[in-house]
Image (cartoon, helix red, strand yellow):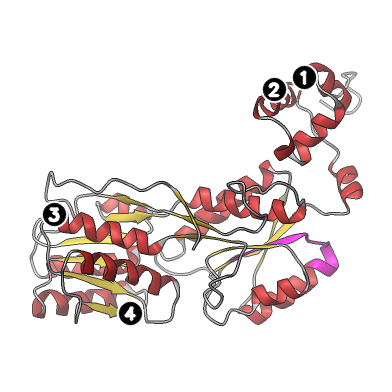
Amino acid sequence: MGPDDGVERPTLASVAALAQVSKQTVSNVLNAPHLVSEATLDRVRAVIDEVGYRPLRAAQQMRSHRSQLIGIRIDPVRDGIGGIVLDQFLHALTCSAEESGHRMVLFTADDAAAEVDAYDELVASFAVDAFVLTGTYHGDPRTAWLRRRRLPVASFGRPWDDPAGRSWVDTDGAAGTRAAVEHLVAQGHTRIAFLGWPVGSGTGDDRRAGWVDAMSSAGLPVAGLDAGLPDDPAVAQATALGLLAARGVTALVCASDSLALGALGAVQELGRRPGVDVAVVGFDDSPVAAAIGLSSVAQPVAAAAAACIELLRGQLDPGPGPVSGGAADEPVLLTPRLVVRSSSDRGGAAVPTATPPVLPAP
């Protein structure tokens, strides 16, 4: 329908009348839903959907002095399956942002310094309100730059140099690899190796820590049973061959599905049966893992994206804590889920019960 079709467009007042609430309540539903009861939220949103009401975003921006824009860098295209989780996260983040009345602004940058330059330009030229960071690492300069300028920020990944840092969402990698080891021990394995990344990666160290903890709890040795590798299936295959042939390994826990693909290649090269003779577990539960029957640890990507948006909303509109009743920038640590498939299932052994999906951050 066009502007001259003779049909009166819904307004804030008409929505309020139909929902039998005040105009302020409708405004709160749109801009500050934490101030509205769940029952009222559902009733007003149902009316909004029924009549197709769309607020005048420009007027909202003028009143709030905000652009409703959130910036995020998109990573360079990479070969293989290493970037699938971030692709899924970006899609979920865009959906969560739109549900809260925001829009994502995507940009590219070759490195952290170029990314910081892009922040400066986006704030100056487009009045971007906030930023989401991914790929955090030791010595990461981006968060400090944003904090100095008092710009709202949420990161998917911990600030590894600052254990007390806030405003981040992350997956508990140690919990994921711990569950993988517990599953393999339940399957009868006692020589369980770990294929991870070089020491110092933060995320990789976290995942290795879960393997060490679970092995120690089970009274199993770890010396000589782990390796730090680039995220390359070919390198992982060569390394796994050595572990299987020389160390008597019967199971491998991997820090990524890319490494797990290499481990599976080694198992097949030796003429052994995945899952029956040698078990392999990956991390990230990529579509490739599902397609080939690879057991893998699934990250709660949609929950992470929603939590990032809630953290930003709490900073943009200070009020009652949006995440679990805490502070506006309280960090969120999410527990992943082990998905067992044929690559690690000898048939019938119990899988450890999953822990609750959200844990308080340490």
Residue drawn at 84 percent across, 69 percent down: 124
Residue 303, x across and y down, in percent = 52, 48
Q: Which residue position holds label 3? A: 187
* Residue type at tag 2: Arg
Sooner in the amino-acid sequence: mark 3 or mark 4: 3
Mark 3 to mark 2 CA distance (whole Å): 50 Å
Q: Which residue position holds label 4? A: 229
- Circles 1 and 2, Cβ within 8 Å, touching? The answer is yes
Sooner in the amino-acid sequence: mark 1 or mark 2: 1
Mark 1 to mark 3 CA distance (whole Å): 57 Å
- Circles 1 and 3, Cβ within 8 Å, touching? The answer is no
Mark 1 to mark 2 CA distance (whole Å): 6 Å
Sooner in the amino-acid sequence: mark 4 or mark 1: 1
- Circles 3 and 4, Cβ within 8 Å, touching? The answer is no
* Residue type at tag 1: Ala
Q: Which residue position holds label 2? A: 43
Q: Nearer the viewer, residue 14 or 264?
A: 14
Q: Secondary structure at mark 1?
A: helix
Q: How many marks?
A: 4
Q: Quadrant of the N terminus?
A: top right
Residue 343, x across and y down, in percent = 20, 55
Residue drawn at 52 percent across, 65 percent down: 157
Evaluate whether residue 118 shows in this view.
no
Compared with residue 35, is residue 149 higher up or lower down, i.e. above or below?
A: below
Mark 4 to mark 2 CA distance (whole Å): 54 Å
